[in-house]
Image (cartoon, rainbow, N blue to C red):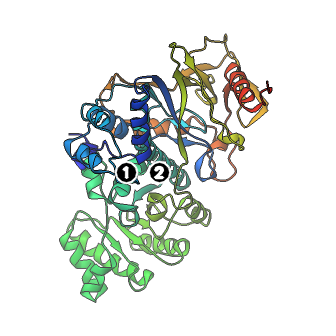
Amino acid sequence: MSAIRDLYRPSLATLTDLYELTMGSGYLATGLAERQAVFTLSFRSLPFGGGYAVAAGLDDALEILEHLRFSPEDIEHLRDMRGVTGQPLFPREFLELLASLRFTCDVDAIPEGTVVFGNEPLVRVSGPLLQGQLVESMLLTVIGFQTLIATKAARVVEAAGGGDILEFGLRRAQGPDGAISAARAAYIGGVSATSNVLAGRLHGIPVRGTHAHSWVQVFGDEQAAFDAYADAQPDNITLLVDTYDSLTGVGRAIETGRRLRARGRTLDAIRLDSGDLAYLSIEARRMLDEAGFEETKIVASNDLDEHLIESLREQGARIDVWGVGTKLDTAFDQPALGAVYKLTAVRDSAGSWRFPVKLSEQTAKISTPGILGVRRFTDATGRFRADMIYDEAMPPDGPGGVIVDPADVLHMRPIDDAWAAHELVLPALRAGRRLAASPALDDIRDRARRQIGALHPAIRRLLNPHVYPVGLERRLHERRTQLVLELRLPRPVR
């Protein structure tokens, strides 16, 4: 059984906002429910002030879509809902449709672990209007949250410069699902392991952990506590040394390490969880090395994020493993990706495609109409050079082409004819059914590592990164501009 269905045995069909259902009922009443439409999920700007994002959450979303069913309990709940006058909110015909509904849309998406950028279509849903509308909220919460956390994790891993990252955020996460989804996404982003045992079971993520201060407090005597823990967990010895005084605790951990060594065991690590982590780790490393425990690692935690990790490394901290919790699992400095799900194409009554545009006083919020895809260009070394958002219904405009920045139409960039083109938005579901089995989470994680490695280091830096070129294909930009002008220019009065 899949992780998402193992965790959520009840139907997830009503994991949606009410207005999706009220619009669905309206589509049925007006005869539009089966009208063919295209919805596109994207985000407008990169999170954390960074230079890239890491797509995540797709496999969970596809699992929900493929098995989307309104259970008898769902239908009964909807039947009991009332409007402001006390009358049933949903007509019988709509509830009967939901009771027999099966998801039959086509879904195209950018695979998990792919580096992505603002305005790019992460997921494209094509099919009956009612179905595409109903799944909006679910897709936004699943894809948006996991993409956010995978991106945060990738930044933390970048800051650690090769040191292991342990995801420790269960106790501070936004509820059980937040913790489990965060653990999955963080692993995609590059963390080495999680402390969350359930996430480890569901997703096959390595699980690691130490002990709490309460272990030491129960014994009263820190040396006795360390020795007892070594006896109880001889193959999992990471000792938390800061219950009373960190460097005194290091000395006592060394004594426990000598006992272990006499029995052919190893003191795997010590953990620092408070104080001046740079100074304490340097002193702890000196003490361990002088005592002959060069192989013992130093783990650090205490409200770490990418910026603090980078600072500690610049200060010469001797930390091997970083435990990151609150600020990773909650995406502390930006708790939402800001993903959007927009109608970008719909067939009219004659069967021709119409491309609706959502206007806004803010240029960044004007939607891009079309059946959107993304073409990524790489140079001869495999480095990513530019991304083109284009309409798949438009014939190719010859080799190369020109991309236009949707936020600044005067900013255009030609595509080098020598660059290789790669399609990013790939088929995932056809008629509601998967085209391939779920990829292994380790394979997704490896893809993310390779993708990030293909970016210029200036794009990967944490502060003021270089801007990666992303734009609309020239003809798509021209059509979008024309549609906007048609809607904005006043019509002559007759």
Quarter location, residue 484: top right
Q: Secondary structure at mark 2?
A: helix
Of residue 96 and residue 369, the one placed in the foreground of this image is: 96
Residue 133 lies, with reference to residue 224, above or below; the image says above
Q: Residues within 10 Å of mark 2 (few under 14, many from 20)?
A: many
Residue drawn at point x = 35 percent, y = 46 percent: 89
Residue 413 lies, with reference to residue 44, above or below; the image says above
Q: Quadrant of the C terminus?
A: top right
Q: Which residue is mark 2?
A: 149
**Mark closest to the chain's N terminus, 1 or 2:** 2
Q: Secondary structure at mark 1?
A: helix
Identify residue type, mark 2: Ile
Q: Which residue is mark 1?
A: 181
Q: Residues within 10 Å of mark 1 (few under 14, many from 20)?
A: many
Of residue 198 and residue 322, the one placed in the foreground of this image is: 198
Identify residue type, mark 1: Ser
The answer to whether residue 146 is left or right of residue 487 is left
Residue drawn at point x = 34 percent, y = 42 percent: 90
The answer to whether residue 34 is left or right of residue 393 is left
Q: Does the CB distance between marks 1 and 2 fall below 8 Å? A: yes
Of residue 365 and residue 213, the one placed in the foreground of this image is: 365
